[in-house]
Image (spheres, helix red, strand yellow):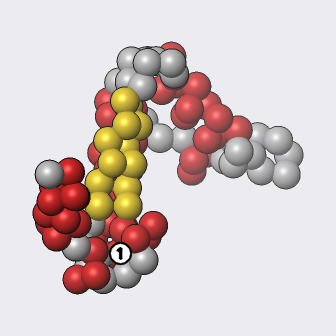
């Protein structure tokens, strides 16, 4: 019985028809409320290009959520850091870099 189930599972998961290396088609999403209690979601794409597209879109979504949930203080600190990185040789912020 066990070998019949394994054979059926191998047939369902036949990877010989998929394009690209298996490790380049895999994507793991790690999430959780903190750094200890985490959950892993593993995905396998049919092609490497599809996996790459998934990864890019998930990264964009996660980045956007971080920005939406950023505190006012963090947002101001980010703007301040950007301005400090654009100092002129005299150590001043150029007026064209100030935006309202």
Does 73 sit left or right of 49 as displayed?
A: right
Q: Which residue is drawn at 58% across and 25% down?
A: 77
In the figure, 69 relative to 65: above or below? above
Helix, strand or loop under label 1: helix
In the figure, 80 relative to 82: above or below? above
In the figure, 73 relative to 5: above or below? above
Viewport quadrant of the C terminus: top left
Q: Find disc 1 in the rendering and name its residue.
A: 48
Residue 99 lies, in percent from the top left, at 47, 41
Residue 33 lies, in percent from the top left, at 39, 18
Does 2 sit left or right of 99 as displayed?
A: left
Q: Which residue lies furthest to the front in this view?
A: 1
Viewer-proximal residue, 5 or 100? Answer: 5
Q: Residue at x 39, y 48 (%)?
A: 28
How packed is label 1: few (under 14 Cα within 10 Å), some, or many (20 or more)? some
Residue 22 lies, in percent from the top left, at 40, 71
């Amino acid at each position: 019985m066990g070998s019949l189930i394994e054979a059926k599972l191998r047939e369902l998961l036949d990877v010989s028809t998929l394009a690209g290396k298996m490790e380049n088609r895999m994507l793991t999403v790690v999430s959780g409320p903190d750094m200890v209690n985490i959950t892993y979601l593993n995905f396998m794409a049919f092609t490497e290009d599809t996996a790459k597209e998934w990864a890019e879109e998930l990264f964009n979504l996660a980045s956007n959520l971080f920005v939406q949930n950023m505190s006012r203080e963090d947002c101001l600190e980010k703007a301040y850091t950007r301005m400090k990185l654009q100092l002129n040789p005299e150590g001043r912020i150029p007026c064209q870099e100030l935006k309202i």
